[in-house]
Image (cartoon, grey):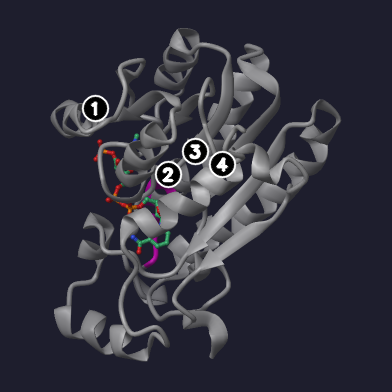
Amino acid sequence: MKNIFSLEEKNILITGASSGIGKSIAIECSKMGANLIITGRNLIRLNETFQLLSGESHQMICADLVNSNEIKSLTDRLPILDGIVYAAGINTKTTAKYINEEKINAIMKINYYAPALLIQSVLKQKKLQKEASIVIISSIASTYAAVSNAIYASSKGAINSLIRVLALELAPQKIRVNGIQPGMVKTDILEAYDLKEELEVFTRTIPLGRLARPEEIAYAAIYLLSDATVWVTGTSLIIDGGTTLR
Ligand SMILES: NC(=O)c1ccc[n+]([C@@H]2O[C@H](COP(=O)([O-])OP(=O)(O)OC[C@H]3O[C@@H](n4cnc5c(N)ncnc54)[C@H](OP(=O)(O)O)[C@@H]3O)[C@@H](O)[C@H]2O)c1
């Protein structure tokens, strides 16, 4: 009997695959049998992920997703997809007094515009299979307030709304759109925290007592990409060790 969580024979695009959560999602999805197209900007680190994938039917394509021409040429090279995981993103901390247009643009371009435009491009070129699954990495930051996180939190709030509207729009094609809202995960993005002590203090407040490991987010991505969730759309799964319980 087929494992309901299997990703065999599914073509899945994973962005942000050169680092952290996206890298872990790529590795774990390859173990579940997916044929992957992994993308990121940094060729050396993307290739490191590529070397760690199980199986042989994978492809890697470098693309800067804030550039609409690169979104177009990435889409041109894609096969028909059964799934997309959007895990590219950045965070820089800024208190309200120091917010400016440049900082807003930098975060919104990759955290919000890029997934919206990539999905548009893939739909326009008919590169999404009927019954495909789209998974976008949001964040608990969208609703869990933290000082100096206004721009990042807003970008993830916008993603939550995008997820719900796209889920409704794409439902007639049985395409599902869901999000994952991680709490703090041990990845390079935490370099946005200037103070190591700030992170240590925060970690002590997490009910389950530690930061997440990237693979703990990857397992949720597998669930949402798999046939186990064919009737799940428009949701966002919180994975935060209990952070938002208080
Ligand atoms: N870590 C956490 O605590 C946490 C918590 C909640 C949500 N998240 C979200 O999870 C996602 C992944 O974060 P992470 O922690 O894995 O961060 P990360 O380790 O810093 O990885 C970020 C990824 O985004 C890619 N990226 C950034 N700018 C890009 C651009 N212009 N074009 C294409 N790719 C670009 C990077 O590619 P290159 O390195 O090749 O440039 C890299 O692969 C983000 O959306 C983040 O907001 C993270």
Q: Which mark is residue 108?
A: none
Vertical side of 129 occupied by 245: above or below: below
- Residue occupying the point 62% across, 11% down: 125
User: What whole-number distance in Å separates the C-alpha atoms at marks 2 and 4?
Assistant: 20 Å
Label 3 Cα neighbours within 10 Å, binned few <14 / some 14-19 / many ≥20:
many
Image coordinates of residue 183 in percent, x first then y, are 43, 69
- Residue occupying the point 52% across, 61% down: 181
Which residue matches tag 3?
85
Which residue matches tag 4?
5
Which residue matches tag 2?
87
Instruction: Give the SS element for disc 1.
Output: helix
Are the residues flagged by discs 2 and 3 in contact, CB closer than 8 Å?
yes
User: What whole-number distance in Å separates the C-alpha atoms at marks 3 and 4?
Assistant: 16 Å
Label 4 Cα neighbours within 10 Å, binned few <14 / some 14-19 / many ≥20:
some
Which quadrant would the N terminus be assigned to in this image? top right
Image coordinates of residue 182 in percent, x first then y, are 46, 63
Q: Earlier in the sequence, mark 2 or mark 4?
A: 4
Q: Earlier in the sequence, mark 1 or mark 3?
A: 1
Q: Earlier in the sequence, mark 1 or mark 2?
A: 1
Would the CB of label 2 be found within 8 Å of ligand 1? yes
Is label 2 or label 4 in front? Answer: 4
In this view of the protein, can residue 140 be seen by the observer? yes
Instruction: Give the SS element for disc 2.
Output: loop
Is label 1 or label 2 in front? Answer: 1
Q: Earlier in the sequence, mark 3 or mark 4?
A: 4
In this view of the protein, can residue 104 be seen by the observer? no
Q: Which residues are magenta?
A: 99-106
* Amino acid carrying mark 4 in the image: Phe
* Amino acid carrying mark 3 in the image: Val
Query: Does residue 209 belong to the magenta stretch?
Result: no
